Image (cartoon, helix red, strand yellow):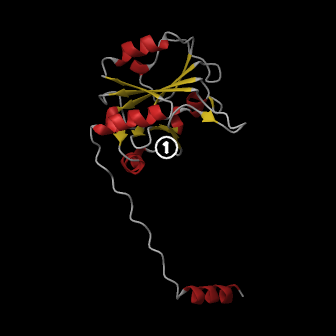
Amino acid sequence: MRERILARLRQALNHRLRPGLPEPLGAAALEPAAWALFQKRLCENGGEVVFLQEDEAPAWLQSFAQTFEGVAIGEGVPPALRPALPQRPPEEAPLGVSWALGAVAETGSVILGSQEGRRVQLLPPTHLVFVSAERIYATLYEALEALKPHLPSAIGLHSGPSKSADIGQIMVKGVHGPGRLVVAVLRSGVWFTQS
């Protein structure tokens, strides 16, 4: 019975044109303008961006972190980029710090891996993400292709602070995650290590 039904379906579909699949998106070359586009897109989404030289990052971090009383730190954050604050569980920390796998200029998104610690990424009200400037890709396709050998089982694309207008069509920040997202782009990949 099953084979007869399938045979009739195949016969009926034989005369139909088969739609062609679109060609894969080409990887766009990353131009210097991609940094500006990344900043523009992330800021349009309510995020903040700061560009730092590698030797500026620890001093900038110390200044940035002084207003917070504690921190939750992701697994991949290098020791030089860990603020000198009391460590707290993510649900109690006012600041979460993560290391991004990469970033996407066309959407203003940072790519965060699951091994980094999803609770650190979502529970603190302020989320600081470090990303190497060498890992800013023009398109998501290009980013996923470049990172394919090193991608964890799950990734998150963060394109700004959490916001929702589910109730009463009123936009509220920080409902499903941090109300503030700050991305610090490091102009040298010295601290980036692939595992």
Q: Residue furthest front?
A: 169
Residue 193: x and y in percent read 36, 33
Question: How many tags in the picture?
Answer: 1
**What residue is at 38 percent from the left and 58 percent from the top?**
25
Q: Is residue 136 left or right of residue 166?
A: left
Q: The disc labelled 1 sits on which kind of residue?
A: Pro
What residue lies at 60% left-to-right and 34% top-to-bottom?
Answer: 163
The answer to whether any part of residue 96 appears in the image is: yes
Left or right: residue 110 versus residue 53 is: right
Which image quarter is the N terminus in? bottom right
Q: Which residue is nearer to you in this view: 26 or 54?
A: 26
Using the rendered view, name the quadrant where residue 179 is placed: top right
Q: How far from the left and from the top, in percent, is residue 104?
A: 41, 41
Q: Which residue is mark 1?
A: 152
Quadrant containing the C terminus is top left
The residue sitting at 56% across, 85% down in the picture is 13
- Name the one closer to the observer, 153 or 29: 29
Q: Is residue 100 visible?
A: no
Give 193 or 7, whichever is nearer the viewer.
7
